[in-house]
Image (cartoon, grey):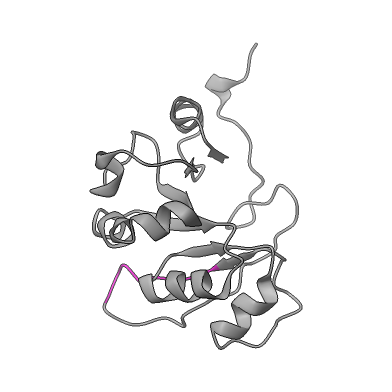
Amino acid sequence: MMSFSAPAVFRMSALCPQLPTVLLIAAPIGSSHLGGALPEGVSTLALDVAVLRQHPEVVANQHGAGHDVYVLTVDADDDIRLCLELGVDAIISNRPGPVLEIAGRPDSPRQPAGLIRRGRDRSSSARRSPLRRWDRRRPGARPGGAPWAPPASAVPA
């Protein structure tokens, strides 16, 4: 679940704790986000590329706090290179072909347009491939094959 609203992300996290949450930031960010802190219930920070250009240190700080960092609308070649150099976890672009080319990966027909995920191995020092495939699952499917459903406490009687 992605939203520009921190309260909305918090509410969704409380209703469905197993659902990954992403806080979208398109404007200048507060010093707490620069230092690696995120609001309760948020597991990932997604920044506009303009914010990343102004504050590249946010990637290392968020990674140090155990959070993923996605970057939105990365279309310029220099911005793609910056994201790859900083080690962001996902590049969201209107130009996935150039992202794959600059990353040194041939275009894959299974790769959905616009989203390139980077993998970081938090369990060991082993290095993964710089980019990994984004798995397309059946609509509504969750990892492990079980369909998502809200918790019983969230469904009105």
What's the magenta region? Answer: 117-124
Vertical comparison of 127 with 40: above or below: below
Quarter of the image with the C terminus is top right
Q: Quadrant of residue 111?
A: bottom right
x and y percentages locating residue 23 in the rendered image: 46, 41
x and y percentages locating residue 144 in the rendered image: 58, 58
Vertical comparison of 50 with 11: above or below: below
x and y percentages locating residue 48 in the rendered image: 50, 51
Between 76 and 5, the one lying in front of the other is 76
Residue at (45, 64) in percent of width and height:
89
- Is 116 in the magenta? no
Vertical comparison of 5 with 117: above or below: above
Image check: 145 left or right of 14? right
Between 131 and 4, the one lying in front of the other is 4
Residue at (57, 24) in percent of width and height:
152
Image check: 35 left or right of 119? left
Image check: 99 left or right of 70? right
Q: Quadrant of residue 33?
A: top left
Between 22 and 86, the one lying in front of the other is 86
Between 13 and 115, the one lying in front of the other is 115
Secondary structure predominantly adopted by residues drawn in magenta = loop
Q: Quadrant of residue 91?
A: bottom right
Residue at (51, 30) in percent of width and height:
12
